[in-house]
Image (spheres, grey):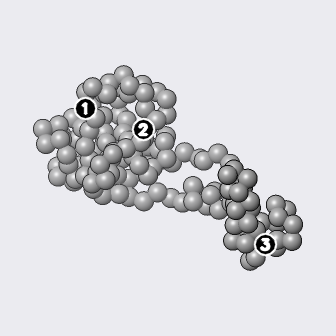
Amino acid sequence: MRVIRRAAAMAALSLGLGLVGLVPGAEAKGPRREPHAQSQRQHHAAPRIQRGRASFYASRFHGRRMANGRRFNRDAAVAASRTLPLGTVARVKNLENGRTAVVTIEDRGPHLRSRVIDLSPGTAAQLGMLRQGVAMVEVTPIRVPDQPG
């Protein structure tokens, strides 16, 4: 069964992708692109201002590891974003009362698609959104770290 799968995979590669060097007689079609160069362009694109709903971490996450490996401190000016690179420094503005805070993106989330950012409880207090739990915010990247490569 494994031999049949391997043969089918090689046939698909030779017909569909035309990879030079892997299958004798296959020719590359179209201009050759370096995948690394394309990924660099995507990383250096300037992140845009995001508007949407923000929430904050529950206190039970205090001390747990974040995506960057550090432990979460509920009083630190940290946040989670699905789209901004880890290490990005961003200004978060509560659009309901005008308060602002500067945070560092150190985790991935929020897990609810209706939210754009998860904040630490300390930052949520600074923005005046502890009572409501959720607020409309504007997230403006200030400094985006250089990507390796």
Q: Name the residue at 27% across, 25% down.
A: 60
Q: Which residue is mark 1?
A: 58
**Depth order, front residue of 69/99:** 69
The residue type indicated by label 3 comes to Ala
Instruction: Identify the residue at horizontal 35%, vertical 25% (top origin).
Output: 73
The label number, if any, that marks residue 84 in the structure image: none
Residue 26: % across, % down: 82, 71
Q: Residues within 10 Å of mark 3 (few under 14, many from 20)?
A: few
In front here: 76 or 32? Answer: 32
Distance of label 3 from label 2 (alpha carbons): 41 Å
Where is mark 2, residue-wise? 107
> Disc 3 vs disc 2: which is toward the camera?
3
Q: Is 33 positioned to the left or the right of 101 in the image?
A: right
Q: Which residue is mark 3?
A: 28
CB of mark 3 within 8 Å of CB of mark 2?
no
Give the residue furthest to the front: 1
Query: Which residue is at 70% across, 62% downward?
Result: 8
Q: Secondary structure at mark 3?
A: loop
Inter-mark Cα distance, 1 to 3: 53 Å
Mark toward the start of the polypeptide (3 vs 2): 3
Disc 1 to disc 2, how far (Cα)? 14 Å
